[in-house]
Image (cartoon, rainbow, N blue to C red):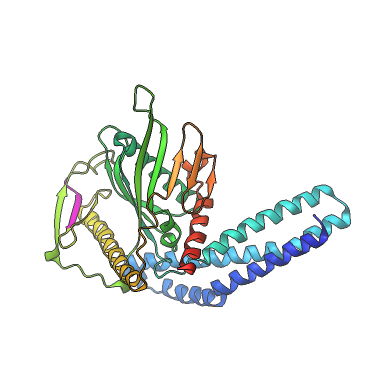
Amino acid sequence: MADIELGERLAALQTTMGSIEAVLDLPALREQVAALEAEASAPDLWDDQANAQAVTSRLSFVQGELRKVGALRTRLDDLPVLFELAEDEGDAGALADAMVELESVQSAIDEMEVRTLLSGEYDSREAFVTIRSGAGGVDAADWAEMLLRMYTRYCERHGWPYEVNDTSYAEEAGIKSATFHVKVPYAYGTLSVEQGTHRLVRISPFDNQGRRQTSFAEVEVIPVVEQTDHIDIPDDEIRVDVYRSSGPGGQGVNTTDSAVRITHLPTNIVVSCQNERSQLQNRASAMAVLQSKLLERRRQEEQARMDALKGDSAGSWGNQMRSYVLHPYQMVKDLRTEQETGNTASVLDGEIDAFVEAGIRWRKQSAANA
């Protein structure tokens, strides 16, 4: 690489990194850490376990953000020195290593830049993700289970803790639906671009004639309710049913009537939870999901009113958002961003970062053009 071209590239990275640091507001993050450390050291912190977990989780996240930004800043500042040493010594191997580090830093800065685009009202929240099988019979149920694995593998790759709240198994194979809680800040802002209908085309493993089958599954992503949201649900507006957990479960999970289904009567929203041993725990988890669904419903109603004022009659952007073709060729393509890859195996194993980042950029650009 020519010295001028290298210099321009390094200068561009310095500019982008400076913008990222400004948007993240590092002094404010350090103040957050100090305040959270003070809360975490309070002797009565664990008297309220839910609040204690929220405080310690937030502290861990902010500390991690500061470490990540600091480490990336150090690597970026070291790059000119690496290239200078390689050139002074005339070492082709050292120059190649410096180029590898340059590409790695570029990739890390691009990823961090995407984070700065998450500025929506609920983007910083944790998320509930629900996957439902659609048209396509047993293939659709199997496809829903494949998507569940894809997203949980994505979480695992990023070190994001998650908990499956409820799984409804299909009779022959796969799942009818599943809901899981992604317990990390900005999970909603990141994963909300995955909301919509996902289409799979493949040779059906359930068809003894080996015919090609198209099946569909729906992904719904909603923000987790926080104490400041004030979603009040009167007891007379819900019906609570208890039943025995079904499908695979740990010892004791499916031997008592501990599973809970809650119906919100005014909206007919139904949620359930069966992963805990205790009926009380399942009820608390189900209520958390219901509150989040009601919060999302309120957000959508507010957005609809704003769109009506703007004269915006466009349909849901998430519908039919991505196609996964396994036969007669291999291709995953996002129908909104045009992002695509032929490496279907890696995508289904959770390597969807390029699609998520493209979706976030697309959403930001769409909002700017609205």
Q: Quadrant of residue 247?
A: top left
Quadrant in which the C terminus appears: bottom left
Q: Is residue 68 magenta?
A: no
Reply above or below: 161 against 185. above
Which residue is pictured at 54% across the width and 51% down the height? 354
Q: Quadrant of residue 267?
A: bottom left
| Residue drawn at (44%, 47%) of the image | 322
Q: Is residue 261 magenta?
A: yes
Could you say which is closer to the camera, residue 179 or residue 140? 140
**Can residue 101 be seen?**
yes
The picture places residue 110, in percent across and down from the top left corner, at: 60, 60
- Asked if residue 14 lies left or right of residue 203, the reply is right
Q: Note whether residue 78 is visible.
A: no
Please provide percent x and percent y for residue 112: 57, 62
Q: Is residue 49 left or right of residue 96?
A: left
- For image coordinates 28% across by 64% down, the residue present is 297
**Residue 17 point in image, percent of width and height:** 64, 67
- Image quadrant occupied by the N terminus: bottom right
Q: Main secondary structure of the magenta part?
A: strand
Residue at 30% x, 34% y: name it. Answer: 138
The residue furthest left is 236
Q: Position of residue 281 (x, y in %)?
A: 24, 56
- Given residues 7 and 46, the one toward you in this image is 7
Task: Please state the extent of the stretch shown in magenta in the rendering.
Answer: 257-263
Q: Is residue 126 above or below residue 21?
A: above
